Amino acid sequence: MDGGLKSYLWNAETLAVEGLQSLIGLRRGIKVALMILVDAFLCVAAVVIAFSLRLGIWDLWNDAIAKVVVACLALWLPLFLLRGIYNSVVRFIGSRTMIGIVVSCIGMMVGLLAVFTVHSVPGVPRTVSMIQPMVFIALLVTSRLFARYVFFDLLNRKSFNGRRQVSLIYGAGSAGRQLAASLRHEPGVLLQGYLDDDDRLVGKRLDGMKIYDGDRASTLVERLGVDTVMLAIPGASRQQRDGIIRKFENISVRVLILPKMRDFLNGSVSLSDLRDIEITDLLGRDPVAPNHLLLHRTIANNSVMITGAGGSIGSELCRQISRLQPTRVILAEMTEHALYLIEGELRELRRSGQLASNIEIRTELANVTDLDTVRRLFDRWRPDTVFHAAAYKHVPLVEENVIAGMRNNIFGTLYCALEAERVNVRNFILISTDKAVRPSNVMGASKRVCELVLQAMAARKSKTRFAIVRFGNVLGSSGSVVPRFQQQIRNGGPVTLTHIDVTRYFMTIPEAAQLVIQASGMAEGGEVFVLDMGEPIRIYDLARTMIHLSGLTVRDADRPDGDIEICEIGLRKGEKLFEELLIGNAPLPTKHPRIMHARETHVEWQELSAVIDEMDMALASGDRQASLEMLSRLVPEYQRKEDQPESSAA
């Protein structure tokens, strides 16, 4: 008997679910018609209830009730259609829809009072004109909340077969409330409450959900078995957001973030607006307001060339420079696909009105190590400002391909600088690297030679203002550890790092590019500008944080059952544990708080050019040993490692 009853109940539940799903699947017009029929019934029911409440007797129908029913129906439908009540989607019904219903019913009340109070009707109490709209409001609101719960909340849960993600919302403000409302329609999410740092809210309830103290986040995550924390404070500063995120960096919980301000009045916050925490949310800094005079000084109304325009820094320079009203932007790049991408992006920005329509965008598929090509470029365009970002920058690759690395970095810079001077380019800015400081690898040493070239040319009183901007790693660039760690985490690990104690400076690409442009506006000739990179980051700590913020655990001796292992693979050729930004000491301040002016010695042009000529011959003959000897002569602090066989790619 019990088995038969269970089978009967299961069949009944299945039929009910199928029936509800078939109703949801009806065309929009049919569903609106059904809603109007239900509201018409509720309107009549409200009249009967109003009479019963007023007279104290239960009478389903009489002439007086019939007269009020006719009046109510005549007022209800036009008012509701006029206010667009039936344009609302039931599953997203919120306070605005409820307010619309109340206002429409108040309009009904005014009409009923005009009919039954000003003109007395026998058998109809005047107060029915006020009671009926109030009862109607209660019935309408209840019916819509019930329909939303049955048709969507309950049905979604019935149709969801997977494991529900236990979640908390950090932030009990407007964004958090609207996100919580949206999560009601997500069957795979079980919301357990809010976290907030406001002591006045802690312990209270919001829409039935308890608000917990944000400082107890780690304890609550463990106690409630939370899988996901959703950060819904879009108006928070970077420092505030960083402080909140740091509470979860050693907890195995996935943290999602609402990245920016949205139009909350329109209820636009939903699960799709959230994104995973990115490492830039932790390592990035609150931006310093740019000095617009410096930003525009070498760009506005000028023709600007960017070499290496398809690279990480080069492409961002192209984007930012194009917004500063240059007359022409010349994109020079040796990789066809990279040039195609950045040109297409800039042209699309111009078409959409984000760039001025009169900006001329020109592309040059060019290798700056070919002197004839460089000469042709500068003769053709004669730019006012050049940002030289073209370089080979991956330390292990350049270490294996010495000939190609030195040729590209040193002679690409030399040829561009000489031709810029020949055609009287006003400003020439070299993008350098922290690896040029006391270099331990060919890439860093070659970039130091590039710096020496520009310093020597500036010292001979060139009409071109040569300047160097030096900084460390940028987040998200090709070959950066951050995208590599992200991919390794997605693949299930292990996350590999060269040494447990290795540290690096980091900066976001947009911030670096903006500071480079402002540094160019301060150049008078020969300066080495050094960007303030903040504090160096231990790469091992970075890896642990990224694993934890992905909702996973680190597998180590303390947690052998963890998800992702961190493996130390040893320093690669030419790598250092710690990077530096300054060769000398006591850098000078500049007009910008995050740009310093380094005080460093340089080599005279005659001495430098003689060694470079010898290096040119050594590179042309493919003599790796001689090339490295020339490099060591120019950069004595470069400690050359034992020679390795030259790669065929050199």
Image (cartoon, rainbow, N blue to C red):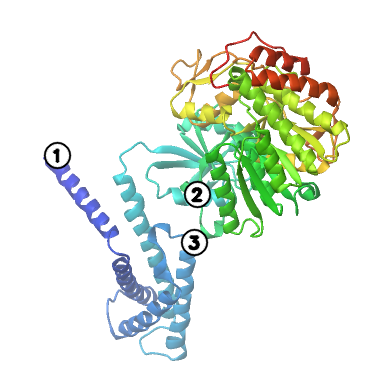
In terms of depth relative to the viewer, which is nearer, 304 or 172?
304
Q: Is residue 269 left or right of residue 450?
A: left
Q: Which residue is mark 1?
A: 2
Which quarter of the figure has residue 191?
top left
Q: Which amino acid type is marked by label 3?
A: Ser
Q: Which is closer to the viewer, label 3 or label 1?
A: 3
Residue 225: give its label: none
Whether residue 484 is visible here, answered yes or no, is: yes
Quarter of image, res 370: top right
Secondary structure of residue under mark 3: helix
Q: Mark 3 and mark 2: span between their CA atoms?
A: 14 Å
Q: Name the residue nearer the viewer: 638 or 205.
A: 638
- The residue under the point 60% across, 14% down is 571
**In this figure, which residue is indicated by the disc labeled 3?**
95
Residue 637 x/y as whole percent = 77, 15
Disc with the residue nearer the chain's start (2 vs 1): 1
What label sits on residue 179 in the rendered view?
2
Label 2 secondary element = helix
Whether residue 603 can be seen here: no
- Whether residue 250 is situated above or below residue 636 in the rendered picture: below
Percent from the top left, x then y, of residue 143? 36, 63
In this rendering, the answer to whether 364 lies above or below 580 is: below
